[in-house]
Image (cartoon, grey):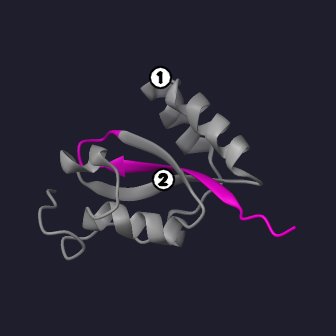
């Protein structure tokens, strides 16, 4: 049995919001969010800045349940989760002006 690993992730946006999602390939998903092609509609109005949280799960079911639980948290609780996460932001490159044309700083 060769099951894919699933990841729950959070992306900080240019307006300080936190987007939560799941994927089997964080690099691919990050590029989709940056490019606007295949990414979430959420990013039509805001720009992704950095993956700030990443958590590994053994299957889609557990990742989906964790995603739903995180989405129910308040902004303060999500920020606390990000602050105590052992995730290293260097695993996924941060957005740069070159990564997407309408980046604001």
Q: Residue 92: in sight, yes or no? A: no
**Residue at image mark 1:** 74
Q: Nearer the viewer, residue 2 or 98?
A: 2
**Quadrant holding the N terminus:** bottom right
> Residue 83, percent across and down?
55, 43
Q: Secondary structure at mark 1?
A: loop
Q: Secondary structure at mark 2?
A: strand
Mark closer to the chain start, 2 or 1: 2
Q: Residue at x 34, y 50 (%)?
A: 40
Q: Is residue 56 left or right of residue 9?
A: right
Q: Is residue 58 left or right of residue 33?
A: right
Q: Residue at x 45, y 64 (%)?
A: 29
Residue range (magenta)? 1-17
Residue 11 versus residue 28 in the image, above or below: above
Q: Residue at x 20, y 49 (%)?
A: 44
Label 2 environment density (alpha carbons within 10 Å; few <14, some 14–19, many ≥20): many
**Quadrant holding the C terminus:** bottom left
**Residue at image mark 2:** 52
Mark 2–mark 1 distance (CA, rounded to whole Å): 16 Å
> Residue 8, percent across and down?
59, 49
């Amino acid at each position: 049995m060769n099951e894919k690993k699933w990841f729950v992730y959070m992306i900080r946006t240019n307006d300080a919001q936190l987007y939560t999602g799941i994927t089997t390939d964080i690099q691919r998903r990050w590029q989709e969010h940056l490019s606007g092609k295949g990414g979430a509609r959420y990013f039509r109005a805001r720009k992704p800045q950095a993956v700030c949280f990443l958590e590994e799960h053994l299957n889609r079911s557990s990742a989906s349940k964790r995603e739903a639980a995180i989405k129910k948290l308040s902004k303060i609780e999500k920020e606390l989760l990000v602050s105590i996460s052992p995730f290293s932001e260097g695993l996924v490159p941060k957005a740069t002006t070159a990564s997407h044309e309408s980046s604001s700083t």
